[in-house]
Amino acid sequence: LDVIRYNVGGGEADNPDSRIGDTARRTESFYVFDEEKGEYVYDFTRDANARRVLDKALEYGAKEVVLFCNSPHYSMTVSGHASGGFEKKQSNLPPENYDKFVDYLLTIADWFVSEGYPVTYISPVNEPQWDWGGEWVGQEGCHYEPQEVAVLMGKFAAEMQKRNTSYKLSGMETGQLSWDYNDYLFKYFENEAVNAYCDTFAGHSYWLDGNKNEKANFGNTFKEKYPEKVFEMSEWCELPLTIDSKTIDSGLHMANVIIEDLTLLNAVSWQSWTAFNGDGVLYEEDGEIKKFNRYWAFKQFTSFIEPGMTRVKVFEDIGTDEKLQEVAFTNEEKTVLVIVNNGEKEKDIKFLEKYPGAAVYVTDKDHNCEKVADGIDGTKYTLSARSITTIVFDNTDK
């Protein structure tokens, strides 16, 4: 775990006319109205709880901070709300406020950098294709048309290049990786400023769980059309949430999605939507923080696959059984192989030789990312039923 995403909120907690009923989904903004001055000013003492979590994440080893917005500040929008327009699919940021939004987010990002935070990316646009607003007001969000995203992000790219910012631009956090929304992607990189400055494209892996054909179609087409760009999977949780999060079923589901996204979408990073609550990996019970099974599933990847590793092919005869999914990464020191056995029975797999230096970790109904073996003594290894197995090979082990 080395990336933490921090929400630069649109300020609905400060909006006296907020339409968001759930107060937990109203954000506290750094941008506040000063009654004495009669204007908006920046107050970086605010959002203390979220910043405390950010500080703890960095203390525990996070190396990158991504600052993302669900909406511009409510004072900049057409509706006067950061929860969307009064009509569905209403573009809620008027063009005359594009530059203002750019300066606002860069001012906040620069403050974080000045305080020593390792900000690597800013992400100004989130799921622009959704309605955001109208009669449904559940959270902060802002609709943009494809050309509007391209123009806005182009302004960010141009200003960031002018200021020579230490952080990069990430976008555009598309809400679904479907070619039904390909205009957003095409317009994005057609913008000269974006194409020249932005080397990543970020999207959310919702509504595609198990749809390998759709994911492969997107991944292959993206790689073909934009060979110099990389894809980041920046948000996922189970939608709708139907699996008991405390069971191995939930962990297996998440592990399958991660492998699909790393291989079929060719994602270079993978991020869970939340850490804490029903669709996250942790929960609270009787005053204690406890771990959903998804926590252990995530750990099977994050504790062993290191930044800078290269994904490598796994020979197909290890995965001829459709109940198996696998992914492998390597560097000079080690190779990490993660295998999911979705079957109800144990499964034998074969290796070309013995690996006495390999370490094997398992999450199943009886283990929570526990080390179960030091070394593979024979060329055959047995995967437990309904399990996630991570094997760490020592590349110096001959």
Image (cartoon, rainbow, N blue to C red):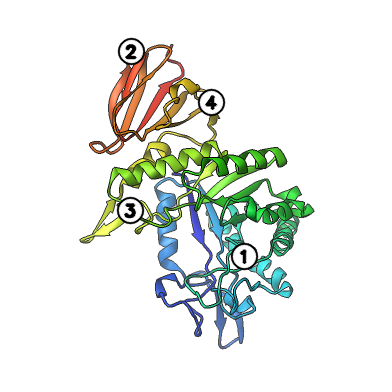
Q: Which mark is residue 282?
A: 3
Number of numbered discs on residues: 4
Q: Give the mark nearer the N terminus: 3 vs 1.
A: 1
Q: Give the mark nearer the N terminus: 2 vs 3.
A: 3
Residue 280 is left or right of residue 141, and the answer is left
Q: Which residue is mark 1?
A: 105
Q: Which mark is residue 313?
A: 4
Q: Give the mark nearer the N terminus: 3 vs 4.
A: 3
Could you tell me residue 139's position as x and y percent?
48, 70
Say if residue 372 shows up in the picture: yes
Does the residue at mark 2 contact the one at mark 3 (Cβ under 8 Å)? Answer: no
Could you tell me residue 53's position as x and y percent?
40, 58
Disc 2 residue type (three-letter): Gly
Disc 4 residue type (three-letter): Lys
Q: Give the mark nearer the N terminus: 2 vs 1.
A: 1
Q: CA distance from mark 3 to mark 4?
A: 32 Å
Where disc 3 sits, the SS reads strand
Q: Residue at x 46, y 73 (%)?
A: 26
Judge the density around disc 4: few (<14), some (14-19), many (≥20) Cα neighbours within 10 Å.
few
Q: CA distance from mark 2 to mark 3?
A: 37 Å
Where disc 1 sits, the SS reads helix
